[in-house]
Amino acid sequence: MVSMTRFSRTLLALGLPLTTQLAWAGYTFEDGNLKGEVNLTAGGAAVSTRNVNFGGGRVDMRSGKNGGTKIDWQEFYVKPGVKLEYAVQPDFSLLAGGSLVGATTLGDGDAGGFTRRSDGKVDTEELYGGFRAGEWTVTAGRQNYMIGTGFIVMDGNLDQLKDGAYWLAPRTAFKDSAVIAWDHGALKAQAFSLGTDSDLGDFRMSGANLDYNLDDQVTLGATAMKVKAMGPISRASPRHRDGMLVYNVRALNAKVPGIPDLTLNAEYALERGSGEGVDYDAKAWYGQADYAFNTLPLTPIIGYRYASFSGDGNLTDNRQEAWESLSKGFVDWSTWLIGDVVGNYLLFNSNENVQQFSLKTHLNEGLTLGAIHYQFWLDEKNYMGAAVSDRRFADESVVFLDWAASKSLSTSLSYNWVKPMAAAKQVFGDDKKFSALELYFTYRY
């Protein structure tokens, strides 16, 4: 699952309701006490995959039919939107906003079998109202919201089946949501209640989030929330969630005194509580280090990250130990779609441990060349409930070229290839290299 529109949603702030952020301003206007913005985002992608599922072929999730090992498809979307603010008093304003998304899938449908040719529709994306009073902002309706880097909370829609455009994933807003935000400079806090779409699982997350920027040296954060299932468990969403309690602590963009070119990030999260006849006992965490060689030509940046999402060693008891990824997001390569092939079609931030090595260089102001290598292990010896004899799952590598052609137009070209290891060979019964050639563009006004 791609959990945010690709390469178009890298955010400047952490833990704020997205409805309060003005990114990529389009046409702005002001008339007396009323000011606003009209914007437009459009994107398209062409993806060509070979040896899907290591030669096992793409399986359509609705019919169960095998579509073969060579899958080529295209996706397009357009998203017009508007934001309005009316100043009633100098420190009190009314807020409103909305957007539509029209998306479609062409060709063979995506390699995971989540969409078919001609899947797609036009539907409301955001539609919210609220007010800002001094340091407080209150919004309700359909809106975007993100905590930290999207490790757990960011995307309220799965973009599968009739939605179309699974790979681009332009739909992200939470439905029937409310966010109360307090912004006191370095200290920011929110109380939230967010509903997801039925494809993601039709559940509600309610809780509180706190972020504190410590002298621009590190942003410390903590989140606590409760999950309530709004619909029954289904074949499309077989995981238990009702009654789950989620706790998260994090340290982001940390700078080490005396080593200004080194950036550290880390998070730790627990899932506890009980509901639907099960007890929850899962965890997820990661540690990441990135070093920028700012004095060298092309400014190379090297990075290393280890991420762990617990699995369940006993699928027959009433304890769910596999991490539930809830509404993870996408802001950049591997965050939090880990591996563009593995993360989209094979593993979904549950029952996996991932070692990641990265290198990227800035060829010029708008051109970035990069490469990432991932090594995947299963946390427990089962894949989607099927027992395996080895935890080593796969290696994925990617080479990508990002080009910001202008302030409005950006593109990316990547080649991804996945080598199956013992667990993947056992599950899929084949050992061919699963590859994807991807071309993407986005235009923002």
Image: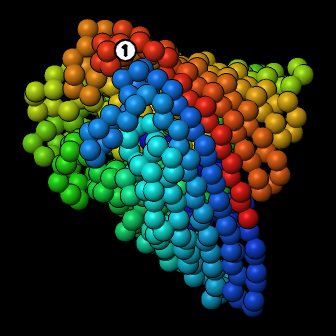
Q: Quadrant of the C terminus?
A: bottom right
Please give left or right for residue 377 compared with residue 91 in the image: left
- Colour convention: rainbow
Residue sitting farthest toward the bottom: 32
Q: Quadrant of residue 285?
A: top left
Q: From the top left corner, tell me how far across and down residue 444 is, in percent.
A: 71, 60
- Could you say which is closer to the camera, residue 269 or residue 376? 376
- Could you say which is closer to the camera, residue 73 or residue 259? 73
Q: From the top left corner, tell me how far across and down residue 141 is, in percent.
A: 43, 72
- The local secondary structure at tag 1 comes to loop
Mark 1 Cα-neighbour bin, 10 Å: few <14, some 14–19, many ≥20: some
Q: Which residue is drawn at 46% across and 69% down?
A: 123
Q: Quadrant of the N terminus?
A: top left
Q: Which residue is drawn at 70% across and 39% down?
A: 412
Please give left or right for residue 278 compared with residue 438 in the image: left
Please give left or right for residue 304 compared with residue 351 in the image: right
Q: In which quarter of the image is residue 346?
A: top left
Q: Which residue is drawn at 29% across and 38% down?
A: 65
Is 226 situated above or below 247?
A: below
Q: From the top left corner, tell me how far across and down residue 272 is, in percent.
A: 25, 38
- Residue linked to disc 1: 430
- Could you say which is closer to the camera, residue 299 or residue 15? 299
Q: From the top left corner, tell me how far across and down residue 442 is, in percent.
A: 68, 52
